[in-house]
């Protein structure tokens, strides 16, 4: 083939390809992708089951997950957990994350073989959670998962396993603001049963220090403190 024709075809292909998908660095699972699908076996032992923006809700979002991996994580790794509210679907994978500039987002490659199943989960039926470090570690710091590009999130969603609480609240310790979390009272609630919806900060805040408070018939239950790292927005 004539060299000029090869060059023209290459330029046309580059112009037709989605620039964002090509340019975005990709974080990949550190080992074989783990996921399972069984009835009523995945019950979270954590109060905080999922943390995501309003752009990253429901099963369709798993193929577009992204975050800004700052502050620097130990070993350039993070742990991504995905858990369905009905307890049927569960995945748990450590990701290797490329070293990036602070504000640069990274896409998480989600190698599921069950995408058709995941597509059936609505916004309040699938909880996704990303923590710094490998999955063998523990902690209360989370990246707020985002999805897609160019759309500023409206809200942050925290999915909570209340462990029998009758009332659940969120408290932003940085601004001393409070709000109620909504009970999910339809469908199966094997893995989580409340959703806290917090408006995305209008300021340039890069982290939120929150507390999830629970009560059972007016009696306090142990609170859960967490730190959320926000992706820079346009």
Image (cartoon, rainbow, N blue to C red):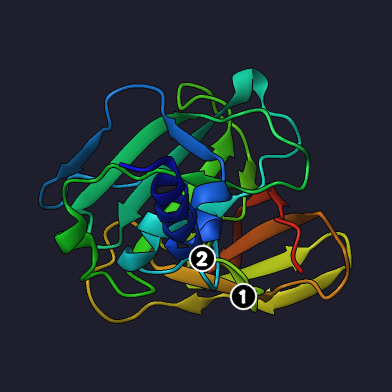
Residue at left 50%, top 39%? 26
Q: Position of residue 64 (x, y in %)?
A: 43, 58
Badge 1 marks a residue whose secondary structure is loop
Seen from the viewer's position, the closer of residues 47 and 65 is: 65
- Image vertical order of residue 188 relative to residue 34, above or below: below
Badge 2 marks a residue whose secondary structure is loop
Quadrant containing the N terminus is top left
Please give the residue where the numbered disc 1 appears in the rendered image: 151
Furthest toward the left, the residue is 39
Q: Position of residue 29 (x, y in %)?
A: 39, 30
Q: Where is residue 103 in the image (x, y as percent from the top left)?
A: 77, 48
Labels 1 and 2 touching (C-beta < 8 A):
yes
Q: Is any atom of residue 48 visible in this view?
A: no
Based on the displayed image, in which of its 4 quarters is residue 186 positioned? bottom left
Q: Position of residue 39 (x, y in %)?
A: 10, 52
Furthest toward the front, the residue is 2
The label on residue 148 is 2
Residue at left 38%, top 74%? 123
């Amino acid at each position: 083939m004539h060299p000029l024709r090869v060059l023209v075809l290459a330029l046309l292909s580059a112009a037709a390809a989605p620039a964002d998908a090509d340019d975005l660095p990709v974080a990949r699972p550190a080992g074989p992708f783990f996921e399972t699908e069984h009835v009523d076996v995945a019950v979270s032992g954590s109060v905080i089951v999922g943390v995501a923006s309003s752009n990253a809700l429901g099963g369709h979002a798993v193929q577009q997950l992204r975050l800004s991996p700052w502050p620097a994580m130990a070993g350039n790794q993070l742990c991504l957990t995905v858990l369905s509210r009905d307890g049927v679907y569960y995945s748990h994978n450590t990701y290797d994350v490329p070293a990036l500039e602070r504000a640069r987002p990274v896409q998480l490659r989600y190698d599921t073989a069950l995408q058709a199943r995941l597509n059936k989960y609505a916004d309040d039926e699938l909880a996704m959670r990303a923590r710094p470090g490998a999955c063998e570690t523990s902690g209360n710091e989370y990246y707020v998962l985002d999805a897609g590009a160019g759309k500023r999130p409206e809200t942050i969603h925290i999915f909570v396993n209340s462990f029998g609480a009758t009332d659940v609240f969120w408290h932003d310790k940085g601004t001393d603001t409070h709000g109620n979390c909504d009970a999910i009272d339809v469908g199966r609630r094997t893995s989580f049963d409340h959703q806290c919806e917090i408006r995305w900060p209008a300021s340039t805040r890069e982290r939120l220090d929150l507390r999830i408070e629970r009560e059972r018939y007016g009696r306090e239950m142990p609170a859960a403190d967490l730190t959320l790292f926000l992706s820079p927005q346009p």
